[in-house]
Image (spheres, helix red, strand yellow):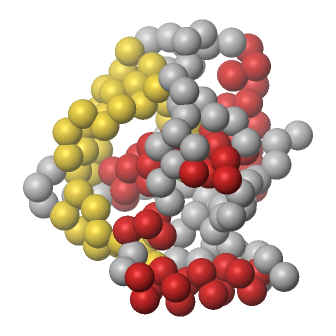
Amino acid sequence: MLQMKLCGDLILREKCSPVSDITPAILNTMDEMVKMMHEQNGVGLAAPQVGITQRFLVMMDPETNVVYRMINPEIVFKSDETCVMEEGCLSVLGPDGLPVYSNVRRPESVDVKWTDENGKEMSARMSGVPARIVQHETDHLDGVLFIDYLSGVKREMLMRKVNRGHK
């Protein structure tokens, strides 16, 4: 059974290693991550969030409910156009045990390439919410959390809520 790592766990700050072999263990972990993501009403989950320092993630396009299982995802293009959207994270929880949210500015669209669960090379241009999700989740693979994009004051306010949840 996978366990969610929460803000403050150092594994969330590690840069993950590329996946060299798509093993049954990785495929099973991805299936379990998809289940976890759905159970917690999330739209994405990266390997370090469940304690694994390898470059893979699962995400769902909330508009189409298509689930992506991405191995070694790489964002190869980011648009100059940016947009601000509210973001939360299943690893950054408030005192009620639910994610805390804040507005984050990111590129509006991105091109991403990855290997799917069958070993097939894939690529897609994503914009809007899916672009936001893939950027948030690939950040996790580099040890970056959405709170790192906030101003010092905003991050401090958000972390006060998070820390109340840890007591």
Q: Is residue 9 left or right of residue 21?
A: right
Give whichever of 59, 73 is nearer the camera: 73
Q: Residue at x 57, y 44 (%)?
A: 14
Quarter of image, res 136: bottom left
| Quarter placement of the N terminus | top right
Where in the figure is residue 52, as x and y percent of width and height? 69, 36
Where in the figure is residue 117, as x and y percent of width and height? 56, 19
Q: Residue at x 64, y 43 (%)?
A: 48
In the rendered view, tell whether residue 127 sits above or below residue 102: above
Instruction: Residue lying at the far right in this picture: please name it.
Output: 1
Q: In this rendering, does residue 81 appear at all?
A: yes
In the rendered view, tell whether residue 159 sits above or below residue 69: below
Q: Residue at x 36, y 32 (%)?
A: 74
Quarter of image, res 111: top left
| Quarter placement of the C terminus | bottom right
Where in the figure is residue 58, as x and y percent of width and height? 57, 39
Give whichever of 81, 16 is nearer the camera: 16
Where in the figure is residue 165, as x and y percent of width and height? 76, 81
Q: Is residue 63 left or right of residue 5?
A: left
